[in-house]
Amino acid sequence: MAPIAKPSNNHGLNQTPQKTRLWLSLPLGAKLHMPLEVFGMPLSKPELERVVFDKFVKHIGVKVTSFKSCNPPEPDILCDTECGALYIELTDNTSQSIQKSVHARDEATQKEAFWIDPFPEGYKHKFDKQYQTNSIACELVIYFGIHPVVGLGDHFDSRLQENIEWIKGRKHSSAFRKVWIYDYHQDCVLACVNGAA
């Protein structure tokens, strides 16, 4: 397990302030808002999860005093909060097709994003999974937008609403107290499904 991290003063969590973060350039001069490498080395899955969590944590409404990465069968992150311990399971919901179209150089491939599902359902297997939580509450963060995707508009909105309804119907029988849908690129929570269906 990774060592416990202490929160920074800006309500986020700062794992390693001494490391330089390198940014991947996107077409048309856009910048990716998440470091994929540190000192030229790719981030591991736990490191990537900590980067996402660091940015997301200010949205949960409680002060996180420390956290650590965990290994299966535990959820991804265990936090100490002002209200007690809390597990967070994270899942990246950015489809490979969208990532490919964002990085494409030709216009035809870039436009393919409009013909694919902007809200893939790869997260759904998390609702059937068993986690070792020792009776500590667990919340799921479905995140996307690490690779910015623009112009999905009404189709994305309707798919988002369909997925919120699906989550409402399944959350009560899952391991999750809350389910968050988080846009990493725009740093905003699109939905939080809480309570009974």
Image: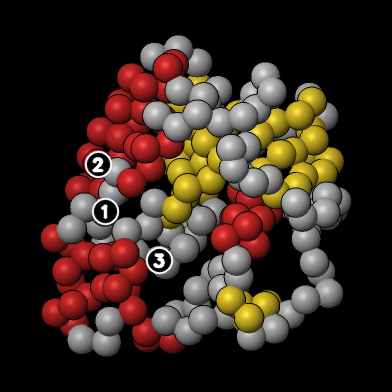
Q: Residue 118 has which mark? A: 1
Can residue 83 be seen here? The reply is: yes
Q: Amino acid at mark 2?
A: Arg
**Contact? badges 2 and 1 (CB < 8 Å):** yes
Residue found at x 70% / y 31%: 86
Q: Earlier in the sequence, mark 3 or mark 2?
A: 3
Q: Spatial distance from mark 2 to mark 1, Cα to Cα?
A: 8 Å
Task: Give percent across and percent down for residue 10.
Answer: 79, 53
Residue 10 shows in this picture: no
Image vertical order of residue 179 relative to residue 101, above or below: above
Q: Image point 33% across, 46% down: which residue?
A: 122
Instruction: Choose between 51 and 71: the one closer to the eye.
Output: 71
> Which residue has dot 3 on it?
148
The extreme front residue here reads 73
C-beta proximity under 8 Å, tags 1 and 3: no
Of the residues shown, which amino acid type is indicated by label 1? Answer: Pro
